[in-house]
Image (spheres, rainbow, N blue to C red):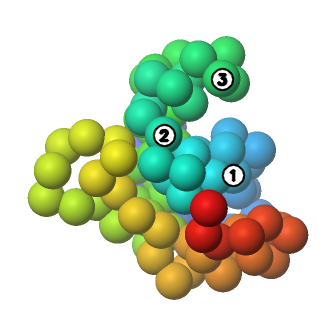
Amino acid sequence: MSSSMINVDTDEMTEIHLVVLLGIRDRKSFRELARETGKSLGTIQIRMRDLERNGYVNKQTEVKARARSLTKKGKMFLKSQGYESDS
């Protein structure tokens, strides 16, 4: 794991990770998330990879951001934070 990747199974889940999870739930693109958060597209992509590697998000066979879905773990995390897991 490179130094830019984190283990989000620990207490290192950041606000941007949460925003990305909510964006996946709402089927938003990486560009939409970057624009809405004021973060770079690269930052959004890195956080998405963190979430994929730690089992919060499944990547479908397509390459688009909208081809991702929350795993059971991702849905449970959103619920634990007071969010609905389905939009």
| Residue closer to the observer: 32 or 55 | 32
Which one is earlier in the sequence, the residue at label 3 or at label 2?
Answer: 2
In the rendered view, would you say 61 is above or below 42?
Answer: below
Residue 23 percent location from the top left of the image: 57, 46
C-alpha separation, residue under disc 2 versus residue under disc 1 = 13 Å
Residue at the image position 56 percent from the left and 30 percent from the top: 33
Q: Quadrant of residue 10?
A: bottom right
Residue at the image position 78 percent from the left and 66 percent from the top: 83
C-beta proximity under 8 Å, tags 3 and 2? yes
Spot the residue most to the right. 82
Q: Residues within 10 Å of mark 2 (few under 14, many from 20)?
A: some
C-alpha separation, residue under disc 3 versus residue under disc 2 = 10 Å
| Residue closer to the observer: 5 or 17 | 17
Quarter of the picture containing the C terminus is bottom right
Determine if residue 49 is in view.
yes
Q: In the drawing, does residue 45 fall left or right of residue 32?
A: left
In the rendered view, would you say 77 is above or below 48?
Answer: below
Residue 16 percent location from the top left of the image: 68, 40
Residue at the image position 67 percent from the left and 16 percent from the top: 38
Residue 62 percent location from the top left of the image: 15, 50
Secondary structure under the numbered disc 2 in the rendered image: loop
Instruction: Using the image, tell me which numbered label, if any, was put on residue 36.
Output: 3
Q: In the drawing, does residue 62 fall left or right of residue 44?
A: left
Please name the amino acid that badge 3 sits on.
Glu
Q: Nearer the viewer, mark 2 or mark 1?
A: 2
Determine which residue is flagged by label 2.
28
Q: Residues within 10 Å of mark 3 (few under 14, many from 20)?
A: few
Which one is earlier in the sequence, the residue at label 3 or at label 1?
Answer: 1
Please name the amino acid that badge 1 sits on.
Leu
Determine which residue is flagged by label 1.
18
